[in-house]
Amino acid sequence: MSKLHLHDLLRLHLILSEFWVDIAKEFFWKTKHTGQFLDYNFDVTKGEIFVKCMEGATTNICYNVLDRNVHEKKLGDKVAFYWEGNEPGDEKTVTYRELLQEVCKFANVLKLQGVKKGDRVSIYMPMVVELVVAMLACARIGAVHSIVFAGFSAESLCERIIDSQCSLLVTADGFYRGDKLINLKVIADEALEKCRDKSFPVERCIMLKHLSKEEQEASSPGSLSPPAKRSCPDLQSGPRQVDVCWHSLMEGASDECEPVWCESEDPLFILYTSGSTGKPKGVLHTVSGYMLYTATTFKLVFDYHPDDVYWCTADIGWITGHSYITYGPLANGATSVLFEGLPTYPDVSRMWEIVDKYHVSKFYTAPTAIRLLMKYGSEPVHKYKRSSLKILGTVGEPINPEAWQWYYNVVGDGRCPVVDTFWQTETGGHVLTPLPAATPLKPGSATFPFFGVVPAILNESGEELEGPNEGYLVFKQPWPGVMRTVFGNHQRFETTYFKKFPGFYVTGDGCRRDKDGYYWITGRIDDMLNVSGHLLSTAEVESALVEHEAVAEAAVVGTPHPVKGESLYCFVTLTDGIDYTTTLEAELRKQVREKIGAIATPDYIQNAPGLPKTRSGKIMRRLLRKIASNQQDLGDVSTLADSTVIEQLFENRCCTAL
Ligand code: WTA
């Protein structure tokens, strides 16, 4: 691929603007945009970084994904979601009209609770329709949702509530994940307690009663029957003044609510993602560009047809759920499956049973789920026909060719294209992806950029590499859905993504381009780990470990794992005089779970009386990665201050996961 010159870029810019302006015509705008379609500065040396899309226009994304479908497109009776609960048989169908009514009601509830345009609302909920209702209700009144994945700990929730300065929390009593009961409200209460301790009292907490009485009382969840009618009784007499009940608030609410018309660049949501310095970053997306981008990528990448039944298995607590369960599919009037449960519960055929039950035609999941199911062979897949499937998608981490082949041949019977979509919380939507049937596939490659996305590969000195090559993956110009800032910290936004190579957005991923111009993501090149498709920063886990009084120093690296992609391998140096015991090990593990959440649970913890350091005192993680995966060939160790630690570390290696 040849280098793009300035005039080519300008021409491309004009063509793209026309492309997007045409797409924008299909949406509802209260007032039209005035300036150019996309205005931006991607070069820190020229001033502040900014991206503005459709300035001057006013719209409402909730109106576009619901009212427009119900009133203009006459899709009121079309199913928006088939909700499939954790327990087979627990199910519900919601049409576009019903969803609109519920959203209007909840928007009125929020208004009555004092939520106004621009206010932040934290949402900490399981995968239930009410989660979608809560997020769209925020969008309807111009409030900014900040969804926290329900697997995060009280500490993580508290940190995110304070960082985004949320005045209200929406949560639920609890839910089942497989046969495990998660008492979400208990964790939420703990988080609110912590917020109060840190002088940030949250004024209101709305709780959805999701568990049935039987579920709460059940000691053997395997024997559950579908839950009975849900309501939340006597909350007002509960211990917390801030608590209000979802159901009683909704009972009195009107189902009509005029949307609040927002400027194109008004904030839509904040979603936290791990940052390499440890503190999570509040990635901020805005209304119009995100709406156009998620709608269009959904339509083209999944080759959307009105009779499709689409199913994305991600959790809405992650960006994949925001863009490709809520906004993208609803903007197209699509019918989706919303699944609360796990791929392995009650058995490893659950996914394929659901595919047949709802005649799913487009299916989107993560390599970690594919590798997990692959372990059980093809028999659980073959128990179901899967003849409705047309396109299979993958996201979250590089997919190894073996998993790709299994997905393509066993799940898709060799007849459904696999779209390997590369993107990030920051990119808002797919940026490198095949278009089904149009792009010849190569297993393991996310193939080519989406329309308007201009990638480049740079070497360490920031020079752009031509042709087949490997280096840093960057983007030369914005697309409508790219993040606008880190909430409350624009400087961190510029430093993280734009300082290393001025003029480019830096993804943090390594990438190879082959002789045919295909892009192959090689994984993170910063201090980030990808565990089961979830990004974690080593610094975040290390600081959770050193908060334990027995730990003097900690260093965390990733080591290859057959299902999770990477697992967490932690080296800890103990405080003088403390012995390393299995009890301490269990405490450390618990400590990380409590600080961050179950996704960050260490797989290995090794007692490391000494860590390999350079003479200037920097921990040499490269060597620790080798030790964790037992690779004796260490390469250049000349900068190591004390080489005796290496031998000791090899001797003490953990061979089995905790
Ligand atoms: C990784 C998830 C290879 C990558 C949507 C990226 C991928 C990070 C792919 C973002 C893919 C995501 N192939 N790697 N198809 N998709 N990644 O923010 O390292 O949770 O930077 O967004 O996941 O993770 P995030």
Image (cartoon, rainbow, N blue to C red):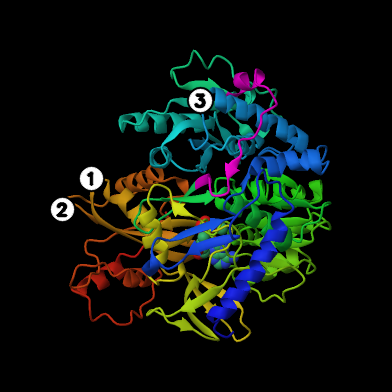
Separation of residues labelled 1 and 2 (CA atoms): 11 Å
- Sequence-first disc among 3 and 2: 3
Does the magenta-highlighted stretch encompass residue 160? no
Label 3, secondary structure: give it. loop
Per the rendering, the mark at residue 191 is none
In this rendering, the label closer to the viewer, 1 or 3: 3
Q: Nearer the viewer, residue 10 or 132?
A: 10
Tell me what residue is drawn at x 42 percent, y 63 percent.
Answer: 497
Which amino acid, by three-letter code, is at mark 3?
Gly
Name the quarter where the N terminus is drawn.
bottom right
* 576 with respect to 411 (left or right): left
**Residue 247 at what x, y percent from top left?**
62, 22
- Write down the region rendered in magenta: 246-270
**Vertical comparison of 248 with 514: above or below:** above
Per the rendering, the mark at residue 114 is 3
Name the quarter where the C terminus is drawn.
bottom left
Residue 179 appears anywhere in the view: no
